[in-house]
Image: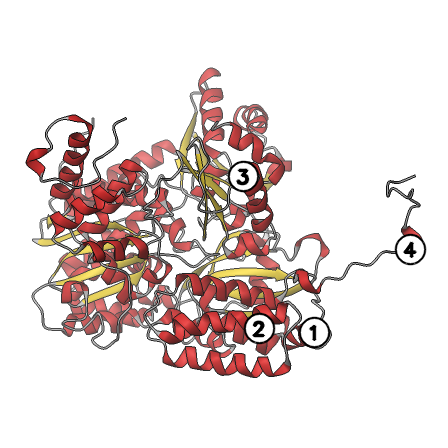
Amino acid sequence: MKIVVPLNSVKELENLREQAQARLVEQAKKIQVKVHLGTCGISSGANKILETFVRQVDSRKLSDVVVLKAGCIGLCGREPVVTVFAPRKEKVIYYDLNEDKVSRIVDEHLVGGRPVMEWVLPLDAPLLKLQEIRVMHNQDLDPMDIEQYIARGGYQALGKVLTQMKPEEVIDEVKKAGLRGRGGAGFPTATKWGFVRSAQADEKYVVCNGDEGNPGSYMNRAVLEGNPHSVIEGMAIGAYAIGNVRQGYAYVRAEYPLAIETLGHAIAQAREYGLLGKNILGTGFEFSVDIFPGAGAYVCGEETALLHSIEGERGNPRQRPPFPANVGGGLFGKPTTINNVETWSDIPQIILKGADWFASVGTEQSKGTKLFCLVGKVNNTGLVEVPLGTPLGKIVFDIGGGIPNGKKFKGVQIGGPSGGVIPIEYLNTPVDYEAVTALGAIMGSGGLVVMDEDSCMVDVAKFFLQFNKDESCGKCTTCRAGIPGMLQILDKISRGEGTMKDLDTLEELAEMVASVSLCGLGQTSPNPLLTTLRHFREEYEAHIIDKRCPAGVCKALVAYHALEDKCLPTSDKGYLL
Amino acid sequence: MEPIDAEARPKEEISVGYAGRIFRRIQKMIDETGGQAGGIIRVLQQAQGLFGYLPAPVIKTISRDFKIPLSEVYGIISFYHFFSTVPKGKYVIQACMGTSCYVNNGAQKLLDALKKELGLDPGGITPDGKFSLETVCCFGCCGNSPTMAVGDDIYTKVKPSKLKDILNSYR
């Protein structure tokens, strides 16, 4: 076993970086086969691909080839994915692999030096070229190896703030970068930190919100599985900037076992290397991170509910103020900042490369890049990272490659059960916090579910209301009783029993639920209904007036009739003659 | 296997036998993690990991040791989807009902096929105790929908026709 001496100064960190980098350079003199092992990859059989490569490389004694593990690069629909790095050559990405394809790649590419072009994803494909990779920049490294992260400049930002920057300067830099919360609401991160810093308390907390319960999005899972140290480093920098923070918590939902394992391993390694714990890098700064695995409750993504959950209670949201940043409002009553996984992972690069670099992409109000999960009825499903303000159409059609099977695009659902459906007319909308909100949806954490002509908007609204109904904690009457009320009416409409007056009732109910409910879940729960009603009203009317479901989804409204000229004669017993 | 006594007895009385061992395990969990933030949820998670569900005597022990009324402990258990007070199968099958799986039209078909194959409704358990069926919202494998999990293994792009093969590998 390797014995690690905790790093005692920034100088020692720099030395380690040089050594680790030299090792990576040495390794790059060989042909590197990197198998991408995220949850998507593993469930598609990437572990078998890894084994097969290792076996074949071993049995053929290819001493100039190394087979390595790496994080997910986001081509989720095309897993298993393998990247081959050969010295002085451009990298080659293979997708849709299976075990049978491995030996030909070994023969022709690893031995013969000629990539098997028919299985290669061209590097100039729009899917790759139109992305701006920043948060995901370490996904070709082994997430289980802290030294690879350090080789790429990892924990340098932490060293820099601890030795060269005052806490206020850190907050100023984040403010200058214009970083806004990646969890969905888009609150300026520096402002939040400023509130917690100015709250008077001798103990404060930082919390990482990884309770990504929003179905259809998994950005946080990908970051935690592929780049866990960036989150830990970000939290440590935040802890220093806020002051009086010795403990951080990472709340990760229980449905992500690999993310919990990877982050747990990363925390243990960081502690071993003296990058978490009592005397970080010999500066006297103390900070630790603990994982708190969720127990399956969507509402715990709401900040006050999340805090209750860490305190060991039911995850019921509560009235604000006091805000978590205030005395008496945070974890165990102490001032607390809660930021999303992606927000934390943006921090080290802002410190290291500067606010100007971060703000060089994006829009006036929304700076930097954002991860989106492009899923549903789209050709290239997966994780994409683009500058904020990229038009929706560019994401869906250029990066996503359009709709499969020649079907027609109908809408894209953004923001999950709190968001809404955006129709084709608005595909030029730049995806930033304000523009999406103006359309009645919310940015949310970044899930984009594409829907084609086969999706019925009444049914989609029903789906999300059902979800919100199941996940409502039951505290507010409007949410507990209002959502089932709306659902009942929608059900009636989908059975063809609705009236035009029902639409008014729905709007009235939605308004009430949105304005009276306490937390984000209740307040935003009518959004899927309201946006479909606003942008696809004719579909509701078809259900009500024509008793017809244009997409053919609502079973009660699908009429079957026989095409007489296609009928075959049958006997009187009913079987074909 | 001996059943666990329904009444949680004082620690010192339980010194021998299976029930004693079980209660010592629970006691150890409480001693080790009880003091951490949210200790009770962590202990409940570990206990569920140990038994596959939360038997009544275990809940009573936890309530007593944390000095939290039993009603509140049940309040916590019923709030979180992951906790169950009824036994689950050796392999818990979870069919994803998330947005992407739903929109791709596969989630319902997959669930119907699972129901038929196992002869279960969500929440049910097979008579041999091997499988139980649940629905969940999202493993975050939305790019490869429809998805399901058998125990800790996640399966993506599941075709109902392949279901028998998948389940047979656990039988």
Which disc, if any, is residue A564?
4
List the residue tagged with mark 1: A542
Q: Residue at x 86, y 40 (%)?
A: A575
Mark 4 vs 1, N-terminal side? 1
In the image, what residue type sits under mark 4? Answer: Glu
The subunit letter for the residue under badge 1 reads A
Mark 1 vs 2, N-terminal side? 2
Which disc, if any, is residue A361?
none
Q: In front of the other: label 1 or label 2?
A: 1
Looking at the picture, tell me which residue is in the foreground, A99 or A15.
A99
Q: Residue at x 53, y 49 (%)?
A: B143
Q: Residues within 10 Å of mark 4 (few under 14, many from 20)?
A: few
Task: Tell me, yes or no, whether the two marked residues, 3 and 2, touch with CB atoms within 8 Å.
Answer: no
Cα–Cα gap, marks 4 and 2: 38 Å
Task: Tell me, yes or no, whether the two marked residues, 4 and 2, touch with CB atoms within 8 Å.
Answer: no
In the image, what residue type sits under mark 1? Answer: Ala
List the residue tagged with mark 3: B119
Q: Secondary structure under badge 2?
A: helix
Cα–Cα gap, marks 4 and 1: 27 Å
List the residue tagged with mark 2: A532
Q: Secondary structure under badge 1?
A: helix
Q: Secondary structure under badge 4?
A: helix
Q: In front of the other: label 3 or label 4?
A: 3
Quadrant hosting residue A344: bottom left
Q: Position of residue A565 (x, y in %)?
A: 93, 54
Q: Quadrant of the N terminus of chain A?
A: top left
Mark 4 vs 2, N-terminal side? 2
